[in-house]
Image: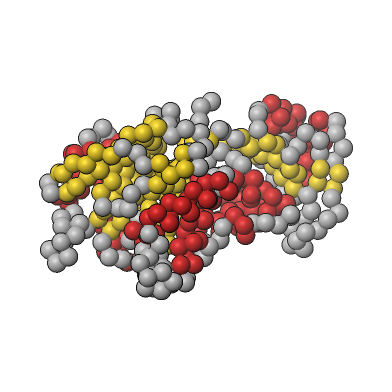
Amino acid sequence: MGYFIDVGYDSINKHGEELCGDKVEIIKHGDGMIIVLADGLGSGVKANILATLTSKIAGTMLREGASISETVDTIANTLPVCNVRKLAYSTFTILKVMNDGNIYAVEYDNPPLVLIKNNRIVEPNKKEFEFNGRKIKESKFRLQEGDVLTIISDGVVHAGVGAILNLGWQWNNVADYIGQLSVSEKCSKNISKGLIDACLNLYEYKPGDDATVVTVKLRQPETVNLFTGPPKDREDDSYAVRMLMKGSGRKVVCGGTAANIVSRELGQALNVSMDFYDPGIPPVAYLKGIDLVTEGVLTLSKAIEKIRDFIFDQNAYTISKISGKDGASQLARLLIEDCTHLNLWVGTAVNPAHQNPGFPAELSIKGKVVEELAKLMRQLGKEVKLTYI
């Protein structure tokens, strides 16, 4: 297994706007992925529509093999220059990220990309060309494991302008801060959220512009194998445990019945902790060979809440907010920071406490919780495999 392309992005809306004028489009393909960050002119609905059109056009055309000149030409003809401000209706940065770490970057009027190598800011060689009156910068370079590549919209470098900072944050200061985050934070999402958190502080929580951060890292793959719920047929208990244990990576068991099955099949004692770190979350347990043992549906649901807030909350909900020692916090941190690939092994036996007798089995609470977890993990860019037993 090669490197894992870890991508995280976050945005904040201009104060008072319901929609963000920036748009990120990520399109995966067999050789890697295409990432587009578009910044629509102005803010609100109009900017959101312009940015969405730009990102969709660029992503779709490049995926289908169009050249950058054809893509820029299409965008230019679709979104002309504003007659009043003489500005493009949408600026953009495009990254073509290959699985081997090779990067092709195209920048049009967005702030320059930030590349961190060996904890130092590196300026890649860029070629500038003019196309239909528009100056385009392109560069080619390669990411190594641990390198951090970040692209931003101008709302980031404008953070604090006219308030805490007279001239805004400025690119050099932003780049320095990304360098600090690249040392302290493991995953891309933590870096993007950390930078957005700093923007919010500089804006005094009333952003004067839309701001977006997209971060790319190459990481060694990290697998988490999670088993929850007893199999429908008791004869499949041993199969479920074999599947859980045979793969590399961390092992997690959620649910009392599932934990007892693993304990029995492994011949290891299950010891329940008496430490209640959160009165609303059952305590964890300990089982030799398993990295984390928690209660089932309730703990999974609480972990999902924390992951959902981490992804969608714009009010500086960083990983530091998930600092508890309870099972849900431990599980959420593990899945966010130490997981690139998640294998979910889900038993389909129906727990009467989780099932209305009038509902079909596929509508059980456990099933819905697991599906929600898989959905959120994919939104974090993780590779998820869901197997029902």
Picture coordinates of residue 84 (x, y %)?
Answer: 14, 67
Picture coordinates of residue 169 (x, y %)?
Answer: 40, 62
Q: Quadrant of residue 267?
A: top right
Which residue is rendered at x = 50% and y = 42% of the image? 119
Picture coordinates of residue 4 (x, y %)?
Answer: 50, 34
* Residue 340 horizontal side relative to residue 45, left or right: right
Which residue is rendered at x = 62% and y = 60% of the image? 321
Which residue is rendered at x = 67% and y = 56% of the image? 323
Can residue 367 be spotted in the picture? Answer: no
Give the total of numbered labels: 0
Q: Is 228 placed above or below 43 here?
A: above
Q: Nearer the viewer, residue 165 or 362?
A: 165
Image quadrant holding the C terminus, namely: top right
Can residue 226 be spotted in the picture? Answer: yes
* Residue 357 horizontal side relative to residue 193, left or right: right
Q: Nearer the viewer, residue 101 or 16?
A: 101
Q: Quadrant of residue 223?
A: top right
Q: Nearer the viewer, residue 157 or 342?
A: 157
Picture coordinates of residue 60 (x, y %)?
Answer: 29, 41
Q: Quadrant of residue 224?
A: top right
Q: Is 28 placed above or below 41 here?
A: above
* Residue 47 horizontal side relative to residue 362, left or right: left
Colour pattern of the rendering: secondary structure
Which residue is rendered at x = 68% and y = 36% of the image? 250
Q: Nearer the viewer, residue 206 or 329?
A: 206
